[in-house]
Image: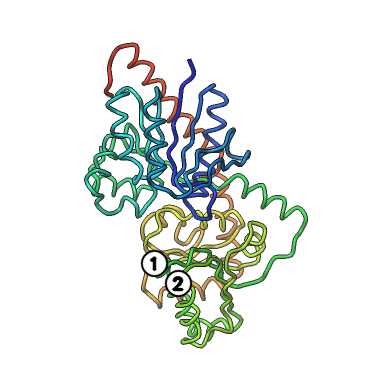
Amino acid sequence: MSDRIIVLLPGLAAHGGIQRFNRTFCKALTAYAKQRHADIEVITLHDPPGWYDERYLRQPVTGCNGRPWQFVRRALAALAQPHQLVIVGHVDLGPLVVPAQLLYPRARVLTLTYGIDVWRRLAWHKRVALQRATRVWAISNYTATRLGAEQQVAQQAIEIVPIPVDPDFVAQLAAWQAVHQQPIRTRLLSVARLQSVAERKGIDAVITALSELRLKVPDVTYTIIGDGNDRPRLEQLARQHDVADIVTFTGRVTDEQLLTYLNGTDVFVLPSRTEGFGIVFIEAMACGKAVVAGAHGGSPEVVEDGVTGRLVPHGDQQALITALSDLLLDDARRSAMGNRGRMRAAGVYSYQQFSLRLAQTLDALLEHNHITQGRGKVRL
């Protein structure tokens, strides 16, 4: 009898770091299931019914169009059927699995965590669901530490698995470089969703630093990719500081356009104070770019200070100006950091490494399930 794996996710189709990671995760999971002859059912909250992309899945998802109660019904119906493993793609979805654990106590649960979603103490029902998971993935050591401190998750249940570079991004980058496309030149680049919490990303700090930075680097320009309800505030901030002439807001761009900007920039900058990991950091590194990031959260585990980029404390304008000017004025140093970043992205954050880690985790969970079924045990 084939193993049955139920996957509960916020969504796959939309823009955003978690969605991009979910797509890469599903790609690796699909390959694993095919090799192990396992069955997968993917239920997503925000995707339309039947959403499908053959790059990531073998069959359409059960999408719920952003309707929470429909998602609850679909998830509980799936969990009421025999299964060996549940993968919970966000802590908010974890409580749905608790009733199913009463029906199928031998089924294993893998919960995925990211960053700020678990850095603060959760509501009790989400915390209990997280504690009951067989294995909890954290994308950084920092998040793993907060899981123990804030959520009281046992350290032996936590596994640190960094987010990989999306293999489709790597393929698109190789294709882009092969035809020698012309990059779009900018000296500084940020990529982020410009929501009302955008100040956490530090984009406003970069804008306010430009008036002093341009005195040291007269040809400095700054391009911001992304959109959201905070964009008008940021545009007004650029006008207030008399730097609107060197700041470009592109809005959302296609994947191919993103590559033209990433390859055309000198420095990628996002001095965030709440970055759980930063997929955009490793994408910039894959393009051979030096990165300036915040010295907080999971960023220091991705960007090596003085090696692949610079880390600056959030809110320290002088440190930010110094880091940016030093890199913009030193071509050799900037290039060396970019090359080291490219090698780090291809090694530490490769899709192959991630797929191997996923296979090892799932093998251990499913094998344990089979052993406990044979022995009548339900606990590790």
Q: Quadrant of the C terminus?
A: top left
Q: Secondary structure at mark 2?
A: loop
Return the residue at label 2.
230
Return the residue found at the far top.
Answer: 374
Dot label at residue 284: none
Q: Marks 1/2: CA distance? A: 8 Å
Q: Quadrant of residue 80?
A: top left
Name the residue type under label 2: Asp
Asked if residue 245 is positioned above or below residue 305 in the image, the reply reads below
Instruction: Point out residue 145 in the picture as x, y percentages from the top left corner.
Output: 29, 47
Residue 150 at x, y percent in the picture: 24, 49
**276 with respect to 283 (left or right):** left
Q: Quadrant of residue 283?
A: bottom right
Label 2 neighbour load within 10 Å: few <14, some 14-19, many 20+: some
Of callouts 1 and 2, the N-terminal one: 1
Identify the residue at horizontal 63%, vertical 56% (top origin). Answer: 255
> Viewer-proximal residue, 203 or 353?
203
User: In this image, 165 relative to 100: left or right?
Assistant: right
Q: Residues within 10 Å of mark 1 (few under 14, many from 20)?
A: few
Residue found 58% across the figure and 76% down from its top: 248
Q: Secondary structure at mark 1?
A: loop
275 and 57: which is toward the camera: 57
Side (left or right) of 321 relative to 332: left
Q: Is residue 224 left or right of residue 365?
A: right
Query: Badges 1 and 2: C-beta atoms under 8 Å apart?
Result: yes
**Residue drawn at point x = 46 percent, y = 75 percent:** 322
Residue at position x 56%, y 67% from top? 225
Position of 14 relative to 137 (above/below) = below
Label disc, if present, on residue 197 of the rendered structure: 1
Q: Residue 112 at x, y = what percent?
A: 39, 42
Q: On the image, which quarter does residue 218 sit in?
A: bottom right
